[in-house]
Amino acid sequence: MVSRGGRSRGCTQCRRRRVKCDETQPACVRCKKRGLTCDGPKAVTWIHSSTGSSSKSDSPTPPPENQMQLVQSKPTFTELSLSAFQDGICLSYTRQKLLKGGVVALAFNKAEATLGAIVPPPDGQLLLEKAVLSLATTFFGRQHQETKLTTKGYQMYGSVLVQLNLALADPHLQIANETVLTVMTCILLEIFLPTGNKSFLQHLKGLDAILRLRGPPLLTSLNEDYRIYHSLRLISVIGGLAMSSASVYSREDWKQVECELCDEHGKLRHAIFDIMADCTRLMAVRAEIIHADSPGIRNAVIEEASGLLKDLESIHATWMQDNARQLQVSTTSFGSPIRFSNYNSANTHLLCNLAIVSITDIIESLQPSSQTKAIQNAAALKIAYCLESDIYNTPQGGGAEYSTIAFVAIKIAWKTLGGLSSPEGRRLASAVKRTVERIFAVGAWQDIPQQSPRLDPQSPNRMIWIDRSSEMW
């Protein structure tokens, strides 16, 4: 028990008059002298601490020894596993290293918007989310030699394919933007992380079928439709070149859609893509008449291809002037090294020469001539010059578009220059070996040797070279 202090125990009269009471029982001396009625001093009040009562005037009680020890010790934190942030890490890494801008950014943004949401997203959105996660997980695992992550990514991809087949059977989902973006994501996985030689082409055929059902975007279409249209054009055209089949973008109604980028390089690339789309159509016709006796159709194909070649020469002249203006120098003279004003300018030059090689290949196969072969070799050699330039060996933002264009350009130039059997081919090989920071689209062609490793384990971004007497891929 403790005594409650801090309060006077004097009688009522003394406390009212604010004088010291002598606390005499039963009446104090002061009250007796004045003849006042005295009720006597107050009794002492005792409080049992076990009752739990307290007040501000109570003396603090020291904490037990074990509580003092807890306060003085440093706080401890539970170590979180990497798996808690696995999806976010894979998505961020894939965004930075592989996929930038265009429809890829659109797919990632839409997927991340509902990632981890409490309310489940619609079926199409959920399928896109799973497709993006499968690509990001597989790519991160492959680049970091994480076998478990890579296996997990491919397992997720298999589940996505099953659900994609169900979505394509639904009339409301088969032409939705989310379905198109899902197919596009699957194509990118098969291009950069192929599961088989023909998987990329199978997805591409399905994408072309969806695009034909949708039709070209209308003037009243949303901006999302325009972004999808322009971003899928590269994949569709390259697939047409690989399969010698006409791309949906070669149709006149699809060419009427305006250019997405209004700058000089954007307009030039738009025109080059239109020419390459026509090239896929001519390749399809050539495949039908190459062994047939159809001189009329053969001459018509040669004439149209020659016209496309002249259009490319005009585009290249415009590019030279624009590039020189941005460099603030005169037009580069013949035979001197090409200087690029910026990354977009170099990418446009690479795409232009890729188109020249493709068109001259059509003409050369139907009407061989030394002049056409010389033009083709010169364009292939310029592709090697592009890869040798400093601007291609600095970490800049090209993303999936650059990687795909670069791989296809290298593949075609390698075939044109004769591989390692020619000095030009060896020069191209050296340029590719120096480009170690790039990730190439290794699955974009159906004649890749299935047994050959595609990535150097010591440097995940470097194309492996085992036997210099064999083909690169």
Image (cartoon, rainbow, N blue to C red):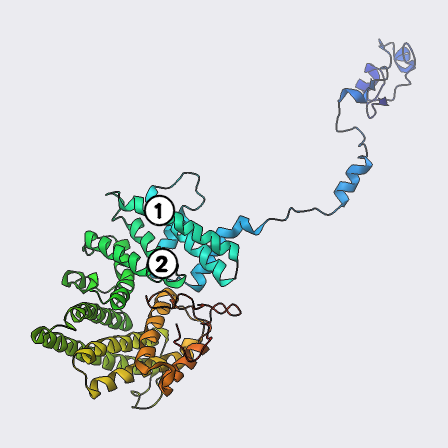
Q: Give how far across and how far down residue 132 sits, in percent.
A: 40, 53
Give the residue type at disc 2.
Val
Farthest residue toward the left?
A: 296
Q: Nearer the viewer, residue 66 or 34?
A: 66
Q: Give whichever of discs 2 and 1 has the lower sequence position.
A: 2
Answer whether residue 340 is visible to the viewer in this image: no
- Secondary structure category for the residue under label 1: helix
Q: Give how far across and how far down residue 428 sits, in percent.
A: 38, 81
Answer whether residue 381 is visible to the viewer in this image: yes
Residue at 85% x, 21% y is: 1
Q: Give how far across and how far down residue 205 sits, in percent.
A: 26, 57
Q: Residues within 10 Å of mark 1 (few under 14, many from 20)?
A: few
Left or right of 218 in this view: 9 = right
Give the residue type at disc 1.
Val
User: In the rendered image, which residue does mark 1 sit on?
Assistant: 162
Left or right of 57 in this view: 427 = left
User: In the rendered image, which residue does mark 2 sit on?
Assistant: 104
Residue at 79% x, 41% y is: 69
